[in-house]
Image (cartoon, rainbow, N blue to C red):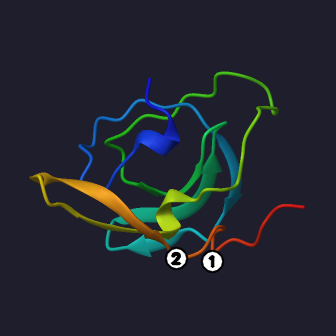
Amino acid sequence: MLSIKDIVPAAQNNITTQFILLDKGRVATEGQSKTCLALVADETAAVHFQFWGKRGSIEKVGEFTMTYVETPNISEMRWVPDPNNSKKYVHEAVVSPYSRIFPPML
């Protein structure tokens, strides 16, 4: 199982992770597909998560509590190609410590 802090751009679409849903945006319809952007987090980081189509699977594994952090938000980091491996990305800078789409939970 992958921690959110270990997810990087260009990751394959077969990620298995466990998180808590903190906030979700409006459901949008694009053609026949529905999409929804959400803020999710685990004990290592937070990230914007795009729900779309039916290719992935989501499973409720617990109740409504889980230890989580809202920072760092890896969606708010600037990523650049790794100079030593063009197939990987490395963290260059933090754009914002928190989500600029979803306000921090208090």
| Label number found at residue 66 | none
Please tell me which of labels 1 and 2 falls first in the chain. Answer: 2
Q: Is residue 60 above or below residue 90?
A: above
Tell me the distance, in whole angstroms, between the alpha carbons under discs 1 and 2: 9 Å
Q: How many marks?
A: 2
Vertical placement of residue 5 versus 98, above or below: above
Query: What amino acid is labelled 1 in the image?
Result: Arg
Q: In the displayed structure, would residue 5 be above or below residue 2?
A: below
Within-10-Å neighbours for mark 1: few <14, some 14–19, many 20+: few
For badge 2, the amino acid type reads Val
Where disc 1 sits, the SS reads: loop
Q: Where residue 39 appears, x then y in whole percent? A: 62, 58
Q: Quadrant of residue 25?
A: bottom right
Are there few (<14), some (14-19), or many (20+) residues within 10 Å of tag 2?
A: some
In this rendering, position of residue 55 left or right of residue 63: left
Residue at 66% across / 68% down in the picture?
A: 98
Tell me, for residue 95, which label it has, or none.
2
Q: Are marks 1 and 2 in contact (CB under 8 Å)?
A: yes
Indicate the position of residue 10 as horizontal and vertical percent values: 24, 54
Q: Residue 100 shows which numbered tag? A: 1
Instruction: Note whether 30 is above or below 89 in the view shown.
Output: below
Of residue 43 and residue 80, the one placed in the foreground of this image is 80
Q: Position of residue 30 (x, y in %)?
A: 36, 74
Q: Nearer the viewer, residue 106 or 51?
A: 106
Mark 2, secondary structure of its residue: loop
Could you say which is closer to the camera, residue 89 or residue 99?
89
Picture quadrant of residue 99: bottom right
Q: Nearer the viewer, residue 97 or 62?
A: 97
Residue at 61 percent of width and 40 percent of height:
44
